Each structure stands twice: as structure tokens, then as C-alpha cells.
Amino acid sequence: MRKLNGFDNYVIKEALKLYAEKCEEEVALAQKTKRKNTTLLYGEGYFTQVAEAISDKVDNLTLSKHLKLQKENV
């Protein structure tokens, strides 16, 4: 399998951030409007935690020289 380059890494991580933020907003809204005697399947922080785990996997699939360049530019 081919490794990802720095741009691929950036795009995937930004998409993960947006997804996690949107899901966390939906969870917060669902908790505010929760009906009596109901339980939510996901709690606050779940999607952020999953996004971070996937982000680590994306880093493992990215060329190491591209990761070094990204860290230097940040």
C-alpha cells in the first residue's frame, strides 16, 4: 500500500476535525432535548476520541518526511 503525502494527511485530519465537531454538537443538542427515560448511545467526547485515534492511524500511514515538514511549519 502506498503511503500518504502531507497534503493527504492534512485533508483527512481537517475532515476528521469537522466531523468530530459536528457530531459533538449533535450529541450536546440531543442531551439538552433528551426525553424522559431515554439513554443516548454516545456521550460527550466520544467522537473527539475516535477522531484522535483515526488521526494517529493517518499519521502512521503518512510519509515520515512529510510529517516532519508539517511539524516544522506549525
Image: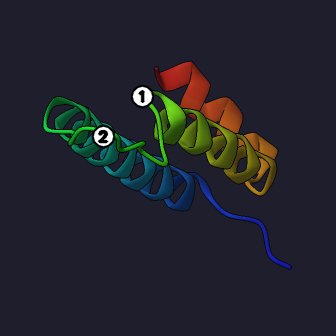
Q: Nearer the viewer, residue 21 or 44?
A: 44
Q: CA distance from mark 1 to mark 2?
A: 6 Å
Q: Nearer the viewer, residue 48 or 67?
A: 48
Q: Quadrant of residue 55?
A: top right
Residue shown at 68% from the left, 52% from the top: 58
Circle 1 residues within 10 Å: few <14, some 14–19, many ≥20: some
Residue 43 is left or right of residue 24, and the answer is right
Extreme residue toward the bottom, this view: 1
Residue shown at 86% from the left, 79% from the top: 1
Identify the element where label 1 is drawn: loop
Identify the element where label 2 is drawn: helix
CB atoms of marks 1 and 2 within 8 Å: yes
Residue shown at 24% from the left, 38% from the top: 36
Circle number at residue 44: 1
Residue 39 is left or right of residue 25, and the answer is right
- The correct choice, above or below, for 62 with respect to 26 in the image is below
Residue 34 is left or right of residue 53, and the answer is left
Q: Name the residue tied to disc 2.
A: 27
Q: Earlier in the sequence, mark 1 or mark 2?
A: 2
Circle 2 residues within 10 Å: few <14, some 14–19, many ≥20: many
Instruction: List x then y, in percent, for residue 6.
Output: 57, 51
- The correct choice, above or below, for 62 with respect to 4 in the image is above
Instruction: List x then y, in percent, for residue 53.
Output: 68, 41
Name the amino acid, label 2. Val
Instruction: List x then y, in percent, for residue 54.
Output: 65, 49
Residue shown at 30% from the left, 40% from the top: 27
Circle number at residue 58: none
Name the amino acid, label 1. Glu
Q: Quadrant of residue 49?
A: top right
Q: Nearer the viewer, residue 61 or 67?
A: 61
